[in-house]
Image: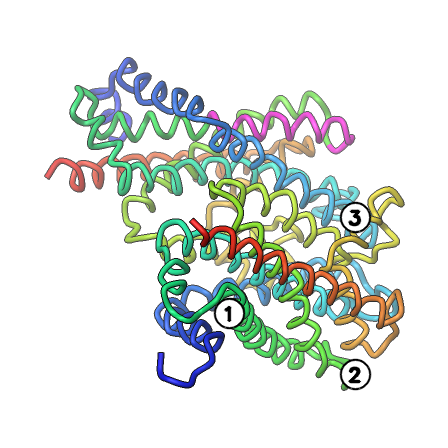
Amino acid sequence: MSLGVHPTVAVLERHLTLYRRLWQASVFSSFVLPVLFLLSIGIGVGGYVGKVQGVEYPSFIAPGVLASTAFQIAVGESTYSVLGDFKWVRAYHAMRATPVGPADMVRGHLLYLVLRVTIAVVAFLTVVLFFGGLHSPWALVTPLVCAVLTVSVAAPVTAFAATIEHDSYFSLLFRFVVIPSTLFAGVFFPLEQLTAVLRPLAYASPLWHAVELCRAATLGTAPAWPVVVHAGYLLAWAVVGFFLAVRAFRRRLED
Amino acid sequence: MVTALVASRVSPGRVGAVIGRNVGALRSGPSYWIVLVSGFFEPLLYLLSIGVGVGALVGDLTVDGRTMPYAAFVAPAMLAVSAMSGALAETTFNFFFKLKYMKTFEAVLATPVRPIEIAVGELVWAIVRGSLYTGIFLVVMVAMGLTEPGWALAAFPATVLVGLAFGGLGMAVSTLMRGWQDFDLMGTGQFALFLFSGTFSPVRDYPAAVEVLVQVTPLYHAVELVRGLCLGVPGWGLLGHAAYLVALAGVGVWFASRRLTRVLCD
């Protein structure tokens, strides 16, 4: 770390240095998979669906797939790698021996994820643009929405990863939280189709709020609830998650 | 050739010992068996979301002159996927871990068990895991009215065959893996199969070149076989799909045991 660099930036730099050696694998998960999803479900199944909420089906699900890609990168990169940096690599313990504090570690990690997500989101948006899926200049704000979503899910998951001892909890997190969220948060079909009992679960998921905002932006329509409510909900998760993560880091580094 | 090879050298007792070791591992704690059991839910969630949720937008689907609710079209595909992912989870992640990191197989080879018996034993265990998923999934399908009980019984052995084929393939791939990074590639490949094997929409819809490409890959044959049985439309064509899966299983086991011999015994 050169003198004068903020400790948070130093942490970001460390993540980027590592990413330079691993980026190839992430191209598949963060770009190829969402595009394949859009082709299979959007265009393949969409041929039988026709119009949903007044637009062709691929245009309907593109913003949903966009937000859920951000969601999956954010969660995925806050699980094994965070626990690993405590447990197996002990990178956070190494950082603790420098002027880097727990808050810097969390901020650096989150900044890195926002960067990762933004690259994926812009690449995906470009594909959607060529498919004719963007119907409003408001589409330009979707990277911002996805960035907020990233922090609002990555921060609490990071806190969780910093608290647990065994990585098999992650399989459960993916099976019972991440995949159901992706499948039932209004990505593939409007929430009204969900039974009334299940709808509150979607309301609780940050992903649904991001999907609503992204869809409103790419289609140029109004989201289900006022924009302030959707955005406020996401920000609340981000802020609370951040403090939980910093607390979890501080506790784990005490010993 | 493969049958002769297997018959001449494989002892049921020693294969049983390999399976027994896996059963014993279940006692290592909830972390293994909870993950194992929870694997069942993934295809079920897809069925509920795409099959039922998106299905409400699709309405009825007509394929080859037969009209059916969209969920009835998707459910057999998710069943085949369930058999595939159960078998692959065991023969890729777990198999690779035992081969490369835990050195389980090196320990096993210090006993009279031979590489081919390890391959067969691991494969049988993978099929047990896959069949657990497909058995419950079939019960769910019958309960949701997506297939008839009689056809569900007919489809069950087909899912066992699907597990056999993907188990063999998984083991063969595992012996070639260099490290965890290769799993990203494998995961992408597996997901592409999942999306494009006629699972969510009929392959007839694809451009001709893509259709041919899909027909070369294994999950397509698994889906066609299982779907034909679940929908109660058996035809001679199903035998072709079954033959493809049998051949894949045979080649997979043969290749995996050869690679194991080279990696572990030289």
- Nearer the observer, B242 or A216: A216
Which disc is residue B250 wearing? none
Circle 3: residue type: Leu
Q: Single out the mark in the foreground, 3 or 2.
A: 3
Circle 2: residue type: Ser
Q: Which residues are magenta?
A: B128-146
Residue A59 lies in quadrant: bottom right
Q: Name the residue at 57% across, 50% down.
A: A160
Question: Which numbered disc flags the more N-terminal residue, 3 or 1?
Answer: 1
Which disc is residue A201 wearing? 3
What whole-number distance in Å separates the C-alpha atoms at marks 3 and 1?
33 Å
Q: Single out the mark in the foreground, 3 or 1.
A: 1
Residue A5: percent from the left, percent from the top?
Answer: 43, 83
Q: Residue furthest left?
A: B266
Residue A106: percent from the left, percent from the top?
Answer: 53, 65
Q: Is residue B117 visible?
A: yes
Q: Main secondary structure of the magenta part?
A: helix
Q: Is residue A31 visible?
A: no
What quarter of the picture does the C terminus of chain B occupy? top left
Task: Check residue B142 for magenta coloring.
Answer: yes
Task: Check residue B202 for magenta coloring.
Answer: no
Q: Are marks 3 and 1 in contact (CB under 8 Å)?
A: no
Which disc is residue A136 wearing? 2
Circle 1 sits on which residue? A104
Chain letter of the residue beneath label 2 in the structure image: A
Residue B265 lies in quadrant: top left
Q: Is residue B129 above or below residue A23?
A: above
Q: Is residue B127 above or below residue A209?
A: above
Q: Name the residue at 44% across, 21% down.
A: B27
State the SS at label 3: helix
Circle 1: residue type: Asp
Q: Are marks 2 and 1 on the same chain?
A: yes
